[in-house]
Image (spheres, helix red, strand yellow):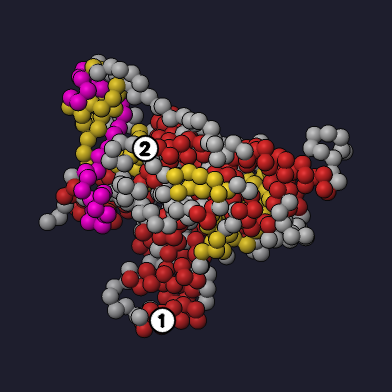
Amino acid sequence: MATKFDAIMARRGEIMLAALGMDYSVFEQSPIAFDYEGMMSAHGYSLDDIVGIQTRAGVGHTPLLELKNLTDVVRSMSAPGKGARIFVKDEAANMAGAFKDRRASVSIHVAKEKGYEGVIAATSGNYGAAVSSQAARYGLKCIICQETFDSRHIGQPEIVEKSRICEAFGAEVIQMTVGPELFFHMVELLDQTGYFAASLYSSFGVSGIETLGLEIAEEMTALTGAPPTHCVITHAGGGNTTGTARGLKRAGATDTQIISASVDLSGLHMASDDDFNRKSFTTGHTGFGVPFATWPDRADVPRNAARSLRYIDRYLTVTQGEVFYITEAMSKIEGLERGPAGNTAMTVAVSLARDLPRDATVVVQETEYTGAGKHHWAQLNFAKEMGVEVRSGDPKGNVPGKVIVIPERPEQIQAQDFDVARMRKSYVRNALKNAPEGYAPTAADIAFLAADTNSDAAAVEAILAALKEA
Amino acid sequence: MTDAIQCKAGDWVEVQRVLLEPADRSKNLPPETAEKPLRMWIKGFAQAAGALGDPMTIETMTGRLVEGSLSAINPGYFHTFGNPIPELVHVGVDLRARLADYHAAQGDAPAGKGGA
Ligand SMILES: Cc1ncc(COP(=O)(O)O)c(C=O)c1O
């Protein structure tokens, strides 16, 4: 029997078509391939246009800071000649406190231009604050659907703070218990209200992040004479990586290594009512990072604009305790008190810079705001209340959801390489799985899969052959 | 937290309701989630007087009328920073001492004193 859930989901395509302000079907080329660049440019805005939209909206142009003390901490534990310079883009300086303002600004601009009365987004993160803030400036109504509580009505401080800030900006916040049906309710509301779907994964949103890559390339060139050698990016759904990398490339920084960074939450189930409050990071973690990188089209749009495997050179993970340590360190030695999730890339940068030459330049491309609830102390105190053990020691003892180990010394911070080749393989497997059964990929499909995984036709063919064997 | 158990029409309140009963939920859920209803909470202006637990209609910030049962009156926010984390309190002094040693070994002037 069809449930209420199934009934709405069956009409999802038609509802989203009206709510997205864009027909995605024109980009489809086959059951596997679509015209990604065509989709990305269909809004017709140049990068300059987007800079203009954002400047008028009070978004972007955030400070680029060199972190000399943090660099010296790294050098104090590096081999001679090693220890790269570390920089950060202080994205917390955006009005709603994160790079997500860039992402929201283009969507909200489009919603206003197209005459929508309001906007809806499903997000428990900083994006909700960004959409709410931009909607307030443009005079649009705003609904944020948030996964906030477990079934006992307990919410982690960080998410409760995100409810507060959205409500502070005048949004209607729908707080829900754990489950992917958040998306079902969002679709139901889009149907009822006729509002614009300000999806995290639309081309509007991801194009808005490109200006961050552009600013980094320009400001690093002004400061050091060249774009950064490495850009480290806190990674969840992959929009941050995709948009920043695209912006760097469009600014001519084609040699900058793109390093995605996530907190390791392996073993925790993202739809589990029990695990929900046993994770101390609500974004920037592998629980989103891996599934979205290996199957981006699981998102709430027909084709996800965030396709991180196209851009990732390396994917490094760190543990929760390591990020909390670096978050504390940043306050104490750099005078920069910022939210923990945004410091995921900072933690990876400390590990990475240690092994790079002194003249290498590592840009951590964001920070996020902090405050009551959205703070590493609040998250750790909450973890203890939820029965998670917090102790000092070697972060190798970390067990997501059970033990958070705070390093005793910075030497113990060691990012781990996540196998990108394996992610490519799993992406290709998912692409096949989502095509009709028995569909044989054409040469054009193989070229698409190669571009979508930043590899080549031979590599894709090898993966396809191996999948056939299995 | 307000201790009010009664609201007047026009008060800022919160209602809660079940969006999906377990039987109506997505089929791909871990058992501990699947066995529970999907619930929601939302704030707005009470359309009538009522007591906690009563059926209540609110007008939300977007002007929608939403029905539920009255779950809070003038609901606030009580998240904080909490106590310092014992496992982190040493980080600042440790790293400052490390930097001082490193700068001394490099022959730098100590931070904040002298230098160009
Ligand atoms: C502060 C911060 N950093 C990084 C991310 C990750 O961005 P993305 O989901 O696009 O990978 C998020 C998004 O949730 C965020 O809020």
Can you give x and y, in whole percent of width and height, for residue A395 in the image? Answer: 54, 53
Determine the residue positioned at 22% across, 35% down. Answer: B17
The amino acid beneath tag 2 is Gly
Q: Are marks 2 and 1 on the same chain?
A: yes
Q: Which range of residues does the magenta coloring cover?
A: B26-54
In this rendering, the answer to whether A419 lies above or below A337 is below
Can you give x and y, in whole percent of width and height, for residue A203 in the image? Answer: 46, 54
Residue under label 2: A155
In this rendering, the answer to whether B54 lies above or below A352 is above
**Mark 1: secondary structure:** helix
Q: Is residue A26 left or right of residue B24?
A: right
Tell me the chain of label 1.
A
The reply to whether the residue tagged 1 has its Cβ within 8 angstroms of ligand 1 is: no
On whether residue A302 falls in the magenta region, the answer is no
On whether residue B48 falls in the magenta region, the answer is yes
The amino acid beneath tag 1 is Ala
The label shown at residue A351 is none
Can you give x and y, in whole percent of width and height, for residue A414 in the image? Answer: 59, 57
In terms of depth relative to the viewer, which is nearer, B51 or A201? B51
Tell me the chain of label 2.
A
Determine the residue positioned at 41% across, 69% down. Answer: A426
Can you give x and y, in whole percent of width and height, for residue A261 in the image? Answer: 54, 55
Determine the residue positioned at 85% across, 40% down. Answer: B109
For the residue carrying disc 1, how many other residues have a C-alpha within 10 Å: few (<14), some (14-19), or many (20+)?
few
Q: Quadrant of residue A464?
A: bottom left
Q: Which quadrant holds the C terminus of chain A?
A: bottom left
**Mark 2: secondary structure:** loop
Determine the residue positioned at 33% across, 21% down. Answer: B74
Residue under label 1: A466
Query: Can residue A95 be seen from the camera position used here?
Result: yes
